[in-house]
Image (cartoon, grey):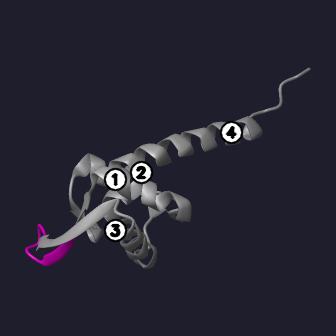
Amino acid sequence: MGNRNEVWLGTLSLMVLRTLETMGPQHGYGLARRIEQISGDRLTVNYGTLYPALLKLEQDGSIRSGWGVSDTNRNAKFYKLTPAGRRHLERETRDWNETTTILARFLSPAEEA
């Protein structure tokens, strides 16, 4: 395993929303592990960043939470994507794709005249 990087601040919400869309309701630890797994263990999720991001997503109505029992039989707060969260995910995905297209133009070798 190479160096692990922390998740970029602006991308964490997008990764959380996408993970919830794909996996269904998850608790914070499960979200962090899944994001790390999908990255091929190249990213690490800092809990000091994850939980404020979850709180912000919940406050803006993109996710909602409720208590449940985890696979290890412990009480855990589970997060679920809302219809507003699906729309948020669609918007953020479009924005991200546009941003990466623009950056690719700057990073690709200059065309010869």
Q: Residue at x 30, y 61 (%)?
A: 63
Residue carrying label 4:
102
Labels 2 and 1 touching (C-beta < 8 A): yes
How far apart are labels 1 and 4 at the CA level?
A: 27 Å
Q: Position of residue 8 (x, y in %)?
A: 55, 62
- Label 1: how many Cα within 10 Å (few below 14, some 14–19, many 20+): few
Per the model, the C-alpha gap separating discs 2 and 1 is 6 Å
Q: Earlier in the sequence, mark 1 or mark 3?
A: 3
- x, y percentage for residue 11? 51, 57
Q: Which mark is residue 84?
A: 1
Q: Amino acid at mark 3?
A: Glu
**Residue 8 visible, this angle:** no
N-terminal of the two: label 1 or label 4?
1
- Give the residue at x 36% y 54%: 17
Relative side of 13 to 29, left or right: right
Foreground disc of the pair 1, 3: 1
Element under label 4?
helix
Sooner in the amino-acid sequence: mark 4 or mark 3: 3
The residues tagged by marks 4 and 2 sit, at their Cα atoms, a distance apart of 21 Å
Residue denoted by label 3: 58
Pick the quarter of the image with the C terminus.
Answer: top right
- Tag 1 and tag 4, C-beta contact below 8 Å: no
Residue occupied by mark 2: 88
x and y percentages locating residue 104 in the rendered image: 68, 38
- Tag 3–tag 2 contact (CB < 8 Å): no
